[in-house]
Amino acid sequence: MHPTETEQKTPWGLVLALWGAGLGAAAQYGKFSAIFDQLPEVYPDVGASLGFVVSIVGLLGIFFGVAAGLMVARIRYRRALLWALWTGAAISAFQALLPPLPWMLASRAVEGLSHLAMVVAAPTLIAQLCAPRDRGLALTLWGTFFGVSFTILAWAGLPLVAWQGIPALLIAHAVYLAIFALFLGARLRALSIDTPVPPLSLSKIVKDHATIYRSPSISAPAIGWLFYTFCFVSILTVMPPYIAEESRAFVMGAMPLSSIASSMIIGVALLRIMSAVTVIGIGFAASALVMIWLWQVPGDPIGCLLLAAAMGLVQGASFAAVPQLNGSPATQAQANGALAQMGNVGNTLGTPVMAVTIGAIGYAGLPLLAGCAFALGGCAHLALARRRARA
C-alpha cells in the first residue's frame, strides 16, 4: 500500500544523501576543470588535445544522454546509481596514478558514462521519494549540485592540490564516492519504487529519442536546459576580462553562489504558488532584461550578480519541471536523460560559439548572443506549453 499525499513524508536525510552523491557527479567534471592550468606539467607537449581531458565527459553525454535514461530504467535506479558511484570511485583512484594521456582519456570516457547514470538515477529517485508537496524544494536543491560542487572544489580542492598535489584531489574524490556508495547501498535497499524493465535495442534507443523530442512534456525541461547551459558556463568563462580587476575575483566567486541562493530562496517560494514552467519563463525573461543592462554597462558587478540570480530561477525550476510534467518514473528518467543530453550540448557549444562571436564583433557579442539565447529559451517553453494545452 502506498501512503496518501497527505500521509507521505519526505525522507530528507536520504534526499540529502542523493544530493551529496550529485556533488560527486559534478566533481567528475569539476576536478579537472579546477586544475586545468596545472595539467601541462603532468602532460607536457600535448597541445590542444589536453582539452579533451575535460571535454570528453561532456561529448559522450551528447550521444548517450537519452540512452542513459533508458539504460537506467532497465537496470533499475538504485542499481544504476550504485554502479555509477563505485565505477566513479575506481576511476578516480586509477586517475590518481596520473597514467599516460591515452589511458587518462579512456578513463574519462568511462567516467562520462558513470556521470550520466548518476545524473539520471539520482533525481528520478529523489522525485519518487519525496512527498508531492516537497518535490519542488528537493529538486531545486538537486539543481544546485553543479554550483555547490564547483565552489567546494575552489575553496577546498585547490588548497588540497597546493598542499599534496593533484593525486590527493583524485583520491579524495574516490573516497567521497565510495562513502556515498556504501551509505546509499544500505539505505536504498528496502525501497521498491522501480518500474517494469523496458526492452533495450538500437531501434528502441532511436525510437526513444523520437518519443522524447516529440513529447511537449518529456522534452520541455531539456529544451529549456539547452539554452540555459549554452549561456551559464560560457558567460562565466568569457565575462572576467570585462569586470574591473579589483572586483573580478569577488564577482566571479559570488555569481554561482548568487545563482544558488536565488534558486533556493526565490525559486522555492515561487514554486509554492506557480508551476515550474512559469518560474523558468520568469527566469529567462529576467536574464534577457539583465543582458540589456550589461550591454549598456559592460562587466557591471551588480548586473553580473543579478544575471546569476535570474539564471538561478531557471536552474532549479528546470529539475522541478520534470516530475510536474511527467508522472511515471520511466518518463521522468527519459526527461532526465534528455536534460543530460541537452545540457552537454549546451556546455560543449556555448563557450566556443561565444568566444567566436566576441572575436568577431567585440564585447557586444556577449549580451547579444546570450540575450537571444535567453529569449529563445523562454519562447521554446511558451511554444511547448501551448502544445500541451492543445493536447
Image (cartoon, rainbow, N blue to C red):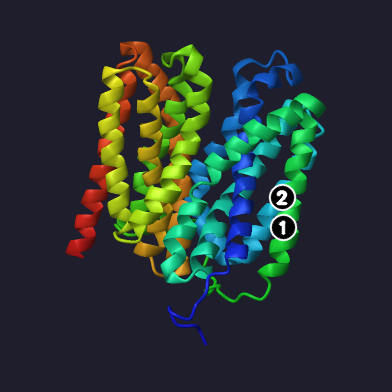
- Mark 1, secondary structure of its residue: helix
Q: Is residue 54 left or right of residue 386?
A: right
Q: Kindly give the residue lying farthest to the bottom in the view shown.
A: 1
Q: Amino acid at mark 1?
A: Ala
Residue at the (50%, 83%) spot, across then down:
2
- Mark 2, secondary structure of its residue: helix
Neighbours of disc 1 within 10 Å: few (<14), some (14-19), many (20+) = many
Residue 154: percent from left, percent from top: 63, 31
Neighbours of disc 2 within 10 Å: few (<14), some (14-19), many (20+) = many
Residue 143: percent from left, percent from top: 48, 49
**117 above or below 32?**
below
Q: Amino acid at mark 2?
A: Leu
Q: Is residue 299 left or right of residue 155?
A: left
Q: Is residue 20 left or right of residue 266?
A: right
Residue at the (34%, 62%) spot, across then down:
325
Rendering quarter of residue 41: top right
311 or 47: nearer the eye? 311
- Where the C terminus falls, by quadrant? bottom left
Residue at the (33%, 12%) spot, across then down:
362
Assess whether mark 1 and mark 2 are in contact (beta carbons under 8 angstroms): yes
Q: Alpha carbon of mark 2 to alpha carbon of mark 1: how far?
A: 6 Å
| Disc 1: which residue | 181
Residue 376: percent from left, percent from top: 26, 38
| Disc 2: which residue | 177
**130 above or below 223?**
below
Q: Is residue 112 left or right of residue 308?
A: right
| Residue 174 shows in this picture | yes
**213 above or below 249?**
below
Residue at the (38%, 49%) spot, across then down:
266
